[in-house]
Image (cartoon, grey):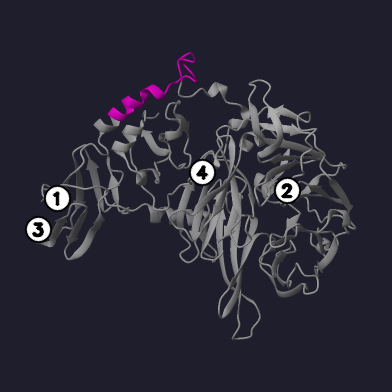
Amino acid sequence: MGIEFTKDYISQHATEATFSRALHFPEGTLRRSVFWDENHAASKPQYSQGSADLSTRALLILTLGPWKAMEVAANCSLRVKRPLLDPRFESYKLSLEPLPSYQLELDAAVAEVKLRDDQYTLEHMHAFGMYNYLHCDPWYQDSVYYIDNLGRIMNLTVMLDTALGKPREVFRLPTDLTACDNRLCASIHFTSSTWVTLSDGTGRLYLIGTGERGNSVSEKWEIVFNEELGNPFIIIHSISLLKAEEHSIATLLLRIEKEELSMKGSGFYVSLEWVTISKKYEDNKKYEVAKRNTLRGKSVPHYAAIEPDGNGLMIISYKPFTFVQAGQGLEESKDENMSEEIKEPLYYWQQTEDDLTVTIQLPEDCTKEDIQVQFLPDSVNIVLKGQRFLEGNLFSSIDHESSTWIIKENNSLEISLIKKSEGMTWPELVVGDKQGEFIRDSAQCAAIAERLMHLTSDELNPNPDKDKPPCNAQELEECDIFFEENFSLCRFDGNTLKTTHVVNLGSNQYLFSVIVDPKEMPCFCLRHDVDALLWQPRSSKQDDMWEHIATFNALGYVQASKRDKKFFACAPNYSYAALCECLRRVFIYRQPTPMSTVLYNRKEGRQVGQVAKQQVASLETNDPILGFQATNERLFVLTTKNLFLIKVKDQQPREDLCQCIIYDVKI
């Protein structure tokens, strides 16, 4: 279902502010998102089920059935930077240039923890079965760590490929990991250039001061905090907060726990615990747990990170997370949140092409003398019994001299506002006010449904020969189908523990995350159509909190064909993206680079100025891949007994081979 949008229609009926908001509807109503793109105005419309707003695209969500549009304060969108897109990108070219590869044999096997019989859900597999056992230090390039089955944290820092030494021990866990049967994999996170958080997988959290890790002279790992925090967990993120009188470490711990009394599904739920450990300098005390807050949900988050200032938390997940009080169950939390959300609107409003009608139910003892209504060209002010009832800027201008109000027989106040611009549809009455409810009459709904009828059908494609059909699902490939249509990006406030921002990601499939700047939050990569777009969260920018910083052309489509992929990553400088399968093979996709020689497209006979290359590396082992990390110059691949280094920094192309080693790879 949709409307045929043109540039003129949009300019007449809405403003840019309209498109930055999404409308929420009760479950069970049929909905479809309709996009208009000024860059492709001549092409057929694009249709999607609930996608994020993309810069110049306008998003309107329309329904059949009950029309009840409630704007949620937290709704916002991702804005794509058009200059970062390449509409002329053709394909990756398979390159046979050899990749220098080095293999190091480990002194002891990696401390891999396999899933137990009671860890049988898909969430256990996502969180622990696909765990990345290789950790990259974002503060020092080409420095990776892993934990072996002797409880040692081993480090390999590469300065020169031709002078590789064996990984060195930097720390040893004080407890025997093998003594605990109910343990998870040990996890580590590099909080800052001098601090590390560590979990041994048994439920104990370590805070370690490392000194300057890039300097072997000053580097010395010492435990400054060590405490049991309940059931086993893994660390997924941590930050260091330094104030004048206090130093704090905030960390996110992930658990999968079972609610014994739950009769729904498997009974397992995902717990994210936000723990803050602090020390005040003036007291000269030890580090202590200062705060613990818990979020619960039904799916493992794809992405979860604390903001650099510690004031918020961002989560990308398929199912929503909510903060819960100690001892409170997940179902209780949901009921409490629903009771907060379901409130009686303070007013109802309707509109036609010429005017708007606002209806307010008055208190029983309210008289005409208790009512004050002030109309201004761009605002309205309503006072009932000396109390401000509704005040603010209107969405658009009104004829304030012609606007009126009366008291109806049913003890309600009816206000008539005459639109200055006739025909414009208002998405809201008072800008930013969410206390009212918009009501559309049945005649308007019928008119809209009739205009949308040509876009709906009981058949999959009733007229495939029609010129430019709106959508032909028969042409979709398996890799174009997404199952997580409802997953979203949420931002939680650290003080109120409430959701402040929500982005409905729709079918923008999550791919991976990468730390570009260790002082900022990790970036996340999403599939947008066929491309893969990299987003950098900017918590300091409330109006534009997520910045599009890079694009990997056609990578969203290419990666979907890799059925056996296990890990996905990219270089911090966006020069390439890479993924590995469960065994042996690593695929590298380089960004387009200028050619040093003349290269022609054989089919079209035109000169090619830039070429994007695909390279494939095959590891000389049959052991499963347990870890995978990418830096600007190298790829690190960890197996049970070996650590592989693949040098990926661009080599100077051999001009005599450029034309004979490049082949087309269809995407």
Residue 29 drawn at (x, y percent): 40, 35
Instruction: Please report contact status of discs 3 and 4: CB closer than 8 Å, yes or no.
Output: no
Observer-side mark, 4 or 2, equals 4
- Residue 400 disc label: 1
Q: Which residue is mark 2?
A: 129
Point 42% across, 36% down: residue:
28
Q: Is residue 418 visible?
A: yes
Which amino acid type is marked by label 2? Gly
Q: Quadrant of the C terminus?
A: top right
Observer-side mark, 1 or 4, equals 1
Residue most extreme to the top: 465
Residue 642 drawn at (x, y percent): 86, 51
Q: How many marks can you see?
A: 4
Observer-side mark, 2 or 1, equals 1
Q: Is residue 252 magenta?
A: no
Q: Which residue is mark 3?
A: 368
User: Upstream in the sequence, badge 2 or badge 1?
Assistant: 2
Helix, strand or loop at disc 2? helix
Which amino acid type is marked by label 3? Lys
Helix, strand or loop at disc 1? loop
Q: Which residue is mark 4?
A: 505
Instruction: Please report contact status of discs 3 and 2: CB closer than 8 Å, yes or no.
Output: no
Point 20% across, 48% down: residue:
359
User: Upstream in the sequence, badge 3 or badge 4?
Assistant: 3
Residue 167 drawn at (x, y percent): 85, 60
